[in-house]
Amino acid sequence: MPLFLNSSIGMSSPDLTPTIQLNTRGLRCPEPVMMLHQAIRKSKSGDVVEVLATDPSTSWDIPKFCMHLGHELLAQEELKDATGLKEYRYLVQKG
């Protein structure tokens, strides 16, 4: 269930198709944000990066990363994996 979805973009929008997918499951701060930063630097403006994480600190680190560096957080979701553990999913569009 989405915790946050940019209201100007619907889920069926092609803009939400990730250009890059990052699996940061099992990694702890600061690694997920560092991997996102590296992926954003290598991508072009408008590209969408999907981040899958298990570290709860990403729920505030990734939104702050986007706000401070001018990228758009398109979606932020908290999910349960197959074993019932929390997983976090983000869609970030490079500004």
Image: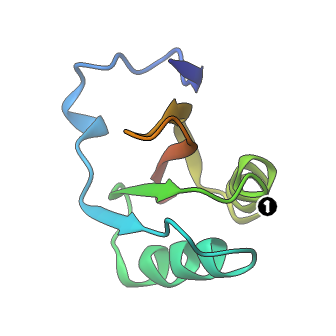
Give, as a three-letter code, the residue at label 1.
Answer: His
Quarter of the rendering containing residue 3 = top right
The residue most toward the front is: 83
* Residue under label 1: 68
Quarter of the rendering containing residue 15 = top left
86 sits left or right of 63 in the view: left
11 sits left or right of 87 in the view: left
Q: Secondary structure at mark 1?
A: helix
Q: Residues within 10 Å of mark 1 (few under 14, many from 20)?
A: few
Residue pictured at 74% horizontal, 79% vertical:
30
Quarter of the rendering containing residue 82 = top left
Q: Is residue 68 above or below residue 12?
A: below
Residue pictured at 75% horizontal, 74% vertical:
29
43 or 34: nearer the viewer: 34
Q: Is residue 42 above or below residue 52?
A: below
Residue pictured at 55% horizontal, 70% vertical:
26
Picture coordinates of residue 23 (x, y %)?
A: 39, 67
Residue pictured at 30% horizontal, 37% vertical:
16
Picture coordinates of residue 79 (x, y %)?
A: 51, 32
38 or 85: nearer the viewer: 85
28 or 71: nearer the viewer: 28
Q: Is residue 36 above or below residue 72?
A: below
Colour scheme of the picture: rainbow
Numbered-mark total: 1
